[in-house]
């Protein structure tokens, strides 16, 4: 998913989901407790990662344990995109697409930059504080090789009081060092 067309500086009012940082490490899934935050980057070094808190850009409370994930998977956020936002690599391009959509909903620019291929990555992500993401629909996913895939999707959004709009895109992803990364996308409508 590409950045919104008319970016503005990220204000404090954007409604960031993340509020605190702490040192963490990756735990095997059988040792992970739902209240633990963990992450280990590809280089194996422990880094600070924001801890989820309540509240989102959607204008509703988000309890990571109980609120549905914004990506539309019908799972709660903690069982869905939070895993990828927390540092686990997405298992496939559609999962990365869903987690990137959720990152846009939550104004999580750090995750978006981290999952953007270096050859096309912008310097920063700017969010429009008036933009509200309304839903994601994955249309089609094609694995084009062992290290490349395309995902077609429609993301609905609204800016301010305007009529809802659609972003219809075919996004390209590559697998680099075991991680799926967003490369770019073609607008389809």
Image: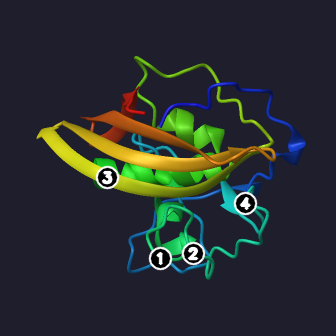
> How much space separates mark 2 and mark 4, taking CA atoms?
12 Å
Q: Secondary structure at mark 1?
A: loop
> How much space separates mark 3 and mark 4, taking CA atoms?
23 Å
Label annotation for residue 139? 3
Pick the quarter of the image with the C terminus: top left
Q: Which residue is mark 4?
A: 58
In this view, the residue in front, 58 or 158, is 158
Label annotation for residue 23? none
In this view, the residue in front, 162 or 120, is 162
Report whether 106 appears left or right of 61: left
> How much space separates mark 1 and mark 3, taking CA atoms?
19 Å
Q: Earlier in the sequence, mark 1 or mark 4?
A: 4
> How much space separates mark 2 and mark 3, taking CA atoms?
21 Å
In this view, the residue in front, 42 or 84, is 84
Q: Earlier in the sequence, mark 2 or mark 4?
A: 4
Identified at 38% across, 32% down, the residue is 188
Asked whether the beta carbons under mark 1 and mark 3 sit within 8 Å of each other, the answer is no
Q: Position of residue 181 (x, y in %)?
A: 37, 36
Identified at 39% across, 49% down, the residue is 96
Q: Which residue is mark 1?
A: 75
Q: Which residue is mark 2?
A: 68
Q: Secondary structure at mark 2?
A: loop
Neighbour tally class for label 3: few under 14, some 14-19, many 20 plus, Cα within 10 Å: few
Count of marks overlaid on the render: 4
Determine if residue 89 is in view.
no
Q: Which mark is nearer the camera, 1 or 3? A: 3
Q: Earlier in the sequence, mark 1 or mark 3?
A: 1
Q: Earlier in the sequence, mark 3 or mark 4?
A: 4
Q: Position of residue 88 (x, y in %)?
A: 42, 56
Asked whether the beta carbons under mark 3 and mark 4 sit within 8 Å of each other, the answer is no
- Which quadrant of the figure has residue 119? top left
């Amino acid at each position: 998913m590409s950045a919104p067309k008319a970016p503005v500086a990220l204000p404090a009012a954007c409604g960031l989901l993340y509020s605190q940082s702490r040192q963490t490490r990756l735990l095997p899934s059988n040792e992970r407790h739902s209240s633990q935050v963990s992450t280990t980057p590809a280089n194996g070094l422990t880094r600070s990662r924001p801890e989820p808190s309540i509240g989102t850009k959607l204008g509703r409370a988000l309890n990571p344990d109980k609120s549905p994930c914004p990506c539309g998977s019908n799972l709660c956020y903690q069982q869905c995109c939070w895993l990828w936002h927390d540092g686990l690599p997405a298992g496939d391009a559609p999962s990365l697409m869903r987690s990137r959509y959720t990152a846009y909903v939550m104004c999580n620019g750090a995750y978006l930059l981290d999952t953007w291929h270096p050859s096309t990555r912008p310097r920063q992500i700017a969010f429009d504080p008036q933009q509200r993401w309304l839903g994601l629909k994955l249309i089609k996913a094609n694995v084009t090789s062992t290290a490349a895939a395309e995902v077609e999707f429609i993301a609905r959004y609204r800016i301010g009081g305007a009529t809802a709009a659609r972003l219809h895109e075919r996004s390209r992803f590559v697998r680099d060092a075991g991680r799926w990364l967003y490369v770019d996308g073609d607008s389809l409508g």
